[in-house]
Image (cartoon, rainbow, N blue to C red):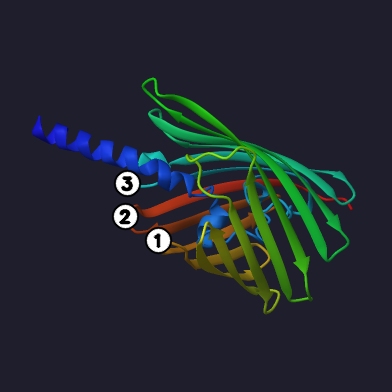
Amino acid sequence: MKKNAAWQHIRCVVFILLPSYLHAQSESIPDHVAGANCFLFSQQVSSAAFGNPSMPDTSASFSFGTYSASSFLVKELNEYGIAFTTRILKNSYFGGGYRYKGYALYNTSKATLSFSRFFGKAFSAGIRVERYSIRQGEGYGQLHFWNVRAGTTVRLSSQLYASSYLGVPLKQSDLKSKSPFHIGIMYRFSEVFACIVESEMSGSTPTLRTSLRYKPSRRIEFIGGIGGKPLCSSFGFVLEYGSMKIAIVTAYRPVFGFSPAMGIDFANPSNK
């Protein structure tokens, strides 16, 4: 009995503390997890639905993806998601997605619709509408929030790219974390090696992250990253096989330990 009571007390403390932690966390998309949550330049289909909306994969006319992420210690951080993007005009893309994080007693979910457009080869912009929900079990009810996210990406040279991302809540609430602003640059040293540096401003506390991407062949890419608060280190790889991409990654965070994630994307090649 004492052991069960102690365990229930621990679960209660975790349950109380998790909401503020979860609100501050972005989606655990494998490509993001591998880069310590550097996401501004990701072209995975899930990233267009939940990350930077100005970076759809232009090599596909239609793509669909699903992913799963878990925590070895706290099942409130387990997450599942699906997403899609489709080209609707020559340089325009429409997409959406749904993700679920948590379990029966406490969970969050998000549904999104996004629109992206390329203006030439040097500039792209995107906007996304989100419906974010928080549900607490045992009769505590459910809350809903609407957000708008916007992103831009600029090609400054053949090797240097810059990107920004801003989230704006349509209704202010003390239960939600402050609107984040992200800015970052990517420098391509060559066709196989790139370095990304991103900064996130949420309130008055900036965080810095960096990610390295190494693609020794057309079919495989290695990704590693470090940064954020609390400090996160991560590593993973993406394997391409025909029209399918498989991502297997993991990240290590204090308290929560290792958090593995896996994703699969299917793409129909563009016929531009």
Asked if the residue at tag 3 contacts the one at tag 2, i.e. Cβ–Cβ closer than 8 Å, the answer is: yes
Is tag 1's residue or tag 2's residue first in the polypeptide sequence?
1
| Circles 3 and 1 in contact, beta carbons < 8 Å | no
> Which residue is label 3 attached to?
73
- 3 or 1: mark nearer the eye: 1
> What amino acid type is highlighted by mark number 3?
Leu
Which residue is at 55% across, 61% downward? 201
Q: Cβ–Cβ below 8 Å for labels 1 and 2?
A: yes
| Local secondary structure at mark 2 | loop
For badge 2, the amino acid type reads Val
Residue drawn where x is 78% and y is 73% of the image: 156
Q: Quadrant of residue 151?
A: bottom right
Check disc 1 and report the residue beneath it.
Answer: 230
Residue 70 in view of the camera: no
Rounded to the nearest whole Å, what is the CA distance between mark 1 and mark 2? 10 Å
The x, y position of residue 237, in whole percent, is: 54, 61
70 horizontally vs 238: left or right: left
Q: CA distance from mark 3 to mark 1?
A: 17 Å
